[in-house]
Image (spheres, grey):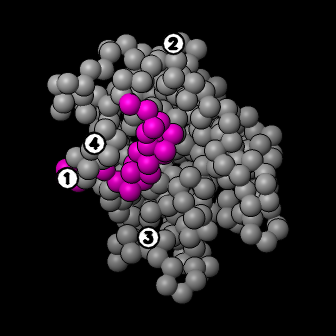
Amino acid sequence: AIDAYTEHRKTLRNISSNHLTDFAKVKKDMGGNTIKQLTTPLIEAWLSFLKHEPKGYYKDGRPMAPYAEASVRRFFYALKSSVEWYAGQHTSVAVPASVFKLSKSSQLKSWAGHRERRLRHGEEERLYAGGLKRKGCYTRDDWQLIIGFALETAMREQELYFAVFDDVDPEGHLLRIYADNEKTKIGRYIPLSDTAKNIIKLQKVSALNGEKRIFHQFPSPNAIGTSFTALCNRVKIVDLHFHDLRHEAISRMCIKHEMTISQIMQMTGHRSMATFLGYMQLFEEHERRD
């Protein structure tokens, strides 16, 4: 079912390589079961394992952090989409309507609604100070560059990872985000602030010959989120995800009043005002605190 669904999506050309890895993970974990064997307790046990057990181990034997809730959510919907699509193509395959209805205790925080986490006083500097000086580790400079760029552009992890120097227009004012690398699959252009332009210049200077990616230090989108989680743990910052930097960035844009709401939505790729209102709530909360 998973193979058939991913092949179907490939024919439509609406599945990115990043999403293909999600389906590969689901196939590895759950592909040994038949659709008839799927039960709600089995799915809930799988989700619990993903949320609480290390997703792997480093070469020195240290455990990696468990999957982030947003990742677990993607895996769940990859399974659900595959099975339900396959059942729709084969009348002999029956999927109980309740099999994907999870108990409240098994649902993820990220399903409850829009997160309202912004950077608190001093947290940005603490993140930068948490950079390591050992060889092969992400330094203060690495974190200042990628976090700083995320705060200037509101880009997601996978967008930062896939961005290449050639995506910047010849005048150096715009960065193109291609639809294949973008969550909503529509593509967009991001106007670059002076700070963002300077970060790109610094990254170009540090890039090895032939390196195309702007944030070449990070070997995968997952490495950005995983390393950021480790950084937060190191500096004792609680309940902060890399994606929250996008919330922070959009809130700052609203506060600056340098762009209209429509312009910010075009820059961030929001097609729905309902979704964007979650960020406006963060902005309004900031105004009340001030």
Mark 4 or mark 2, which is nearer the start of the sequence?
A: 4
Instruction: Classify mark 3: residues with Cα within 10 Å, few (<14), some (14-19) or many (20+).
Output: some
Mark 3 or mark 4, which is nearer the start of the sequence?
A: 4
**Disc 2 from disc 1: Cα separation:** 35 Å
Q: Residue at x 78, y 51 (%)?
A: 62
Residue 9 screen position, x and y as percent: 25, 47
Amino acid type, callout 4: Tyr
Mark 4 vs mark 3: in front = 4
**Disc 1 from disc 4: Cα separation:** 10 Å
Q: Which residue is mark 1?
A: 11
Q: Residue at x 39, y 48 (%)?
A: 19
Residues rendered magenta in the picture? 11-34
Quadrant placement of the C terminus: top right
**Disc 1 from disc 3: Cα separation:** 26 Å
Mark 1 vs mark 4: in front = 4
Instruction: Classify mark 2: residues with Cα within 10 Å, few (<14), some (14-19) or many (20+).
Output: few
Instruction: Classify mark 1: residues with Cα within 10 Å, few (<14), some (14-19) or many (20+).
Output: few
* Residue 28 placement, left or right of 205: left
